[in-house]
Image (cartoon, grey):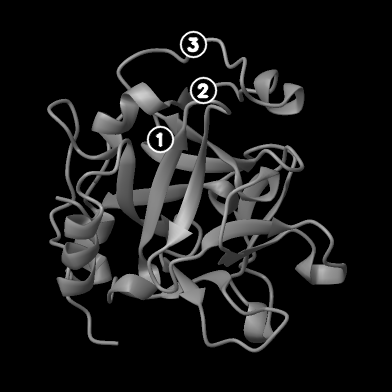
Amino acid sequence: MTSVLLALSALVGASALTAPAAAAAAQTGRPATVRTAVPAGWEVVEGDEVAALNGGADGKRSSASPGPAAQNLTAQDADADELSLIAMQSVRNQRFVTTEKNYPAPNTGALRARSAEYGGSWEGFAFEWDETTETYALRSLANDLYVAVEKNFTGSSQNLLRARSTGVGGWERFVVYYNAELDRWALQSTLNGLFVAMENGYTGSLQYALRARSAEIGGSWEEFVLYDLGA
């Protein structure tokens, strides 16, 4: 893929998205395991704060510009409510999260933080807010499928994030957190109540894979920088 955004070195210094405007309200629509476990120093990003996710009046946009694929998707989704087009960069290895849509089964659509640059739809995601559950679903722009947590996978692949669902249920729901001091973001699966980590120590085809496997946000493994592609 040919990069259409700035190189990694230029993006690292940019803070694309900013803190939510207010403290999180009661989270009555989420599972109890998620409702009661907001980490210290972090706050929940909710639907009424999508303007911040989109780099609104109170937000900061990335210094980069979206490529043609992202621009086309922005136009297609222009009338969608509370939707943000986002690229995710792992703090741990400074690489962008990619959907491995060409991987063979059972790992087709696996999410891995392996791209040095944002190159197009492979590294793009739509964050879609649901008012009823007060959670986000992540739709991959690479294959137009929703990201699920593979709770039933075994071994090192258990709780792997894969863009493989045509609809959204409990497997595809996430709570998004922001830490203003760190200027970092985190994702928590509502399926198992665990935070998404990047497996920097893995080898082979799942090196840098994303898995919902951490009981807490322990450091850079669970932290991401988010970039707005709708700017």
Give left or right: position of 221 versus 213: left
> Rounded to the nearest whole Å, what is the CA distance between mark 2 and mark 3?
15 Å
> Rounded to the nearest whole Å, what is the CA distance between mark 1 and mark 2?
9 Å
Q: Are the two marked residues, 1 and 2, in contact with CB atoms closer than 8 angstroms? A: yes
Please name the residue shown 43% across and 67% down the image.
144
Q: Which residue is label 2 attached to? A: 41
Q: Which residue is label 1 attached to? A: 182
At mark 2, the secondary structure is loop
Which residue is more in the foreground, 69 or 168? Answer: 168
Please name the residue shown 29% across and 52% down the image.
227
Quarter of the view holding residue 109: bottom right
Three-letter amino acid code of the residue under disc 3: Ala
Q: Earlier in the sequence, mark 2 or mark 3?
A: 3
Please name the residue shown 29% across and 71% down the image.
118
Q: Which residue is label 3 attached to? A: 25
Spot occupied by residue 39 in the image (x, y as percentages of width and height) = 61, 25
Three-letter amino acid code of the residue under disc 2: Gly
